[in-house]
Image (tube, helix red, strand yellow):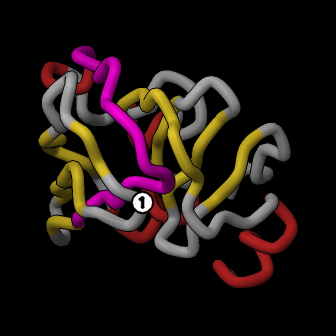
Amino acid sequence: MTTTPTDRKYAASHEWLTQDGTVGISDHAQEQLGDVVYVELPEVGREVKAGEAVAVVESVKTASDIYAPASGTITAVNDELSGSPEKVNESPYEGGWLFKLDVTEEGDLLDAAAYEAQAN
């Protein structure tokens, strides 16, 4: 397991959010999912509420909803995941990001230490 980056906030449901609105899932989440084989991303321009299911990650084990860690508008999606969903496993905090939000209000988020404590 990699170290949980401290430059972002985390939802109890294992999504992370950076200051620029980038969203992905934690290393803990991708480990629990196993090998990711498909990612269904939200539409750019969609308005979402914190806690709303906005994407789906499918693995060899299961399919899991991905929840918005904040309210706002989807401004971009990681199109590279359509051809390379394994990036979610290989680089959950960098190349495996899912989408970007223009954040209007953060949800109930944790810092890295609090997230690690509840995830383990």
- Asked whether 27 or 114 is in front, the reply is 114
Q: Residue at x 18, y 41 (%)?
A: 39
Vertical order, 12 against 104 (above or below): below
Q: In which quadrant is the N terminus drawn? A: bottom right
From the image, give the main secondary structure of the stretch colored magenta.
strand
Mark 1: amino acid: Ala
Please give the range of residues in magenta: 65-80
Looking at the image, is 87 positioned above or below residue 16?
Answer: above
Q: Horizontal placement of 74 versus 56: left or right? A: right
Q: What percent of the width, then of the height, locates residue 17? A: 59, 43
Q: Position of residue 111 (x, y in %)?
A: 80, 60
Residue sitting farthest toward the front:
104
**Position of 94 relative to 86 (above/below):** above
Residue 5 occupies quadrant: top right
**Count the marks: how many?**
1
Which residue in the protein does label 1 denote? 50
Left or right placement of residue 24 versus residue 93 in this view = left
Of 80 and 8, which appears nearest the observer?
Answer: 8
- Is 72 covered by the magenta stretch? yes
Q: Is residue 58 magenta?
A: no
The residue nearer to you, when weighing 116 against 67, is 67
Residue at image x 73%, y 43%?
A: 8
* x and y percentages locating residue 60 in the rendered image: 16, 61
Q: What x and y, as percent, mark residue 93? A: 59, 36
Residue 76, quarter of the rendered image: top left
In terms of secondary structure, where does tag 1 sit?
A: loop
Residue 98 shown left or right of residue 114 in the figure: left
Which residue is painted at 15% across and 66% down in the image? 63
